[in-house]
């Protein structure tokens, strides 16, 4: 990360904007996502938006990939104004790419509170979209738990909850329920008592 940041600074100082510049920013953005450094990722993707305006500086797949990441990043930061502007300015050819379609579907699921679709999309996130979604999956899990506790009475099976909310395994799910101080036992979440706690 430090080496890529130094290369980025050199490219900026020398005012170099070519395919290598795009490659450096794309690589650093991906590494930042993997490391969970969203601040560094945001710096890279802001510059990439400018670089990707020239179609000769990067491939169509990379432009599509980072357009999807920008949408997911704005969902993560709850920046609705910029998100709406980004979607409105999205070129038609980019809208048809599966990574962008996925990001737009995530936006719809979050906006509509459709937790079933959201967690299905989370499980099948293309490229590194899952790393961005990791940044707001807990927020969506909490909202989903509230909706489930309101809709299902008196209880729901924990194994169903684990699958529905895309936990890696049952232990993660039980840890999350304990962390949220919800009432559960014998393989079931008590939605009635848990609803009062939420």
Image (cartoon, helix red, strand yellow):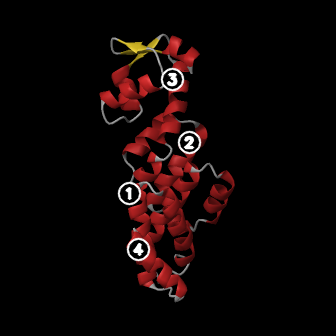
Work out how far the residue at label 3 is from the one at label 1, CA to CA, in angstroms. Answer: 31 Å
Mark whose residue sits in front, 3 or 1? 1
Judge whether 9 appears above or below 178 on screen: below
Disc 4 designates what residue? Answer: 4
> What label does residue 69 carry, if any?
none
Judge whether 59 appears above or below 178 on screen: below
Q: Quadrant of residue 190?
A: top left
- Report crowding for label 2: few under 14, some 14 to 19, many 20 or more residues within 10 A (C-alpha): some
Work out how far the residue at label 2 is from the one at label 1, CA to CA, in angstroms. Answer: 23 Å
Disc 1 designates what residue? Answer: 34
**Which corner quadrant holds the C terminus?**
top right
Q: Is residue 77 visible?
A: yes
Q: Secondary structure at mark 4?
A: helix
Disc 3 designates what residue? Answer: 148
Frontmost residue, 172 versus 80:
172
- Give whichever of discs 4 and 1 has the lower sequence position: 4
């Amino acid at each position: 990360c430090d080496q890529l940041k130094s290369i980025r600074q050199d490219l900026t100082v020398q005012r170099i904007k070519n395919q290598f510049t795009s490659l450096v920013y794309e690589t650093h953005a991906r590494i930042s996502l993997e490391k969970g450094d969203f601040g560094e990722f945001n710096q890279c993707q802001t510059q990439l938006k400018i670089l990707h305006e020239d179609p000769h500086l990067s491939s169509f797949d990379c432009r599509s990939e980072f357009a999807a990441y920008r949408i997911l990043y704005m969902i993560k930061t709850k920046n609705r104004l910029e998100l709406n502007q980004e979607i409105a300015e999205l070129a038609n050819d980019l809208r048809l790419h599966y990574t962008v379609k996925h990001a737009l579907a995530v936006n719809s699921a979050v906006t509509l509170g459709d937790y079933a679709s959201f967690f299905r999309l989370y499980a099948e996130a293309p490229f590194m979209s899952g790393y961005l979604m990791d940044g707001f999956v807990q927020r969506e899990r909490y909202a989903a738990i509230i909706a489930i506790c309101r809709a299902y009475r008196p209880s729901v099976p924990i194994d169903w909850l684990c699958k529905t909310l895309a936990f890696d395994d049952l232990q993660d799910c039980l840890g999350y329920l304990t962390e949220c101080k919800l009432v559960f036992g014998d393989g079931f979440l008590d939605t009635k008592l848990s609803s009062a706690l939420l």
